[in-house]
Image (cartoon, rainbow, N blue to C red):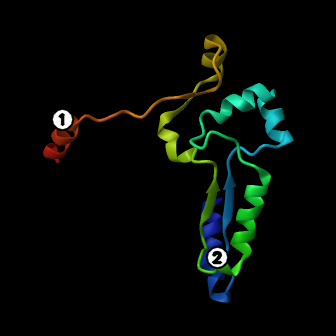
Amino acid sequence: MLGLTKTAAVEYGRYGIRVNAVSPGAIQTDMLLQVFGSQEKVDRMRTVHPLGRIGRSEEIADAVAWLFSEKCSYYTGRSLTLDGGLTAQRPFLQQLTNAESVQSGQDRFTWKPPMVLSDDLVETSLAQH
């Protein structure tokens, strides 16, 4: 999707046409509830988002309205990610396989806290490079 967005932005920019994509994360909708199977599971999903909540459809609509506005006239060829910071922490979010999830009784996603680097480790790493 991003490749197509970038290509179209380059191709049509000379005609004053801006091309962007919107990449929403989890948004509180009936479809999300169907995917997770219960409100309890949706509520647990909130805990892996840095903002501690699921997005609202109005927030996506507001962002799309901004993309269409003149206030966004210099923005093209990009994807606007609206996911409450979920992808910003992606290296720390570990998705369990179905087998692991069933076996452990855990949700499919677990929070894996970031590694804290000690000053000694950072100095050693910098000295090696």
**Residue marked by disc 1:** 120
Apparent side of residue 77 relative to residue 91 in the rendered image (left or right): right
**Tag 2, which secondary structure?**
helix
Task: Name which residue type carries label 1.
Answer: Asp
Q: Which mark is residue 103?
A: none
In this view, the residue farthest toward the top is: 103
Q: Going 69% across and 71% down the picture, which residue do you hit?
A: 67
Q: Which mark is residue 72?
A: 2
**Tag 1, which secondary structure?**
helix
Apparent side of residue 122 relative to residue 10 in the rendered image (left or right): left
The answer to whether residue 77 is above or below residue 17 is: above
- Whole-percent x and y of residue 79? 62, 62
In this view, the residue farthest toward the bottom is: 15
Apparent side of residue 127 relative to residue 88 in the rendered image (left or right): left
Q: What separation in Å lies between label 2 and label 1 (alpha carbons)?
A: 45 Å
The quadrant in which residue 117 appears is top left
Q: Going 34% across and 34% down the picture, which residue do you hit?
A: 116
- Whole-percent x and y of residue 93? 53, 34
Task: Name which residue type carries label 2.
Answer: Cys
Q: Going 56% across and 46% down the picture, which residue do you hit?
A: 87
